[in-house]
Amino acid sequence: MSVQHFKLREIAEIQLGVTLRGSDASRHDPAGTHQLIRISDLSDDGSVSIGEPCLIKLSSGDAARYELKPGEVLVAARGTRMTAAVLYAGGGPCVVGGQFLVVRPQQRLNPEYLRWFLNLPTIQTRLFSFARGTYVRSLPASSIGDLDIPLPPLPKQHAVAELNRLRIREKELMAELAEQRGLLVDHSVLQNFQQ
């Protein structure tokens, strides 16, 4: 079976996150309208887990243009990693700042498949090589748009996405198991000292 290849910009819209101006623009505002997702809210495996809430106010024009929708892929575009994550519904309206690229896949591209592809070590290395700057590396939207991506039929994309989800879950379970094993060993040693 031959798989078609596309430039990412041919099968998805790519946009930079909202530009926040001023030193206080990204500080938490209790009266804010949108949750600001920060790079620290992305795990290395590509999941979004909002730590401390950071609400910001956006104008109606910015809200219409930058408000995130479920199924969009967020790519950390500044710093030492270019991790991709899929956004899911929940918690109210969200936006990302200019340190992210937002990828809006067409219907023929499964967001979880795209996340898997962008987080592959070889692709991460390529993305980092596209980044500009010496002190803080920044990934231009045009570079990620030129990325060649294999696009199998949707059922195969779903299968790859499910395998990736299971791999990530296995990794989480193995980490939990190692932690519990460590606690058991520590408890056994302490019990031994008390006899």
Image (cartoon, rainbow, N blue to C red):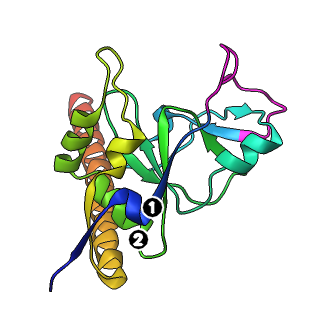
Q: Nearer the viewer, residue 3 or 173?
A: 3
The residue to which callout 1 is attached is: 12
| Residue 28 relative to residue 124: left or right | right
Image vertical order of residue 82 relative to residue 11, above or below: above
Residue type at mark 2 is Leu
Q: Nearer the viewer, residue 91 or 129?
A: 129
State the image coordinates of residue 66 (x, y, percent, origin top left).
Answer: 65, 46
Q: Nearer the viewer, mark 1 or mark 2?
A: 1
Residue type at mark 1 is Ala
**Residue at left offset 32%, top offset 43%:** 143
Residue, far right: 31
State the image coordinates of residue 190 (x, y, percent, origin top left).
Answer: 26, 31
Can see residue 46?
Answer: yes
State the image coordinates of residue 31 (x, y, percent, origin top left).
Answer: 85, 32
Q: Secondary structure at mark 1?
A: strand
**Residue at left offset 41%, top offset 70%:** 110
The quarter of the picture where the C terminus appears is top left
State the image coordinates of residue 161 (x, y, percent, origin top left).
Answer: 34, 69
Answer with the quarter of the image where residue 127 lies.
Answer: top left
| Residue 16 relative to residue 136: left or right | right
The quarter of the picture where the N terminus appears is bottom left
Q: Are marks 1 and 2 in contact (CB under 8 Å)?
A: yes
Which is more N-terminal, label 2 or label 1? 1
Q: Is residue 15 magenta?
A: no
The residue to which callout 2 is attached is: 109
Q: Magenta segment range?
A: 19-34
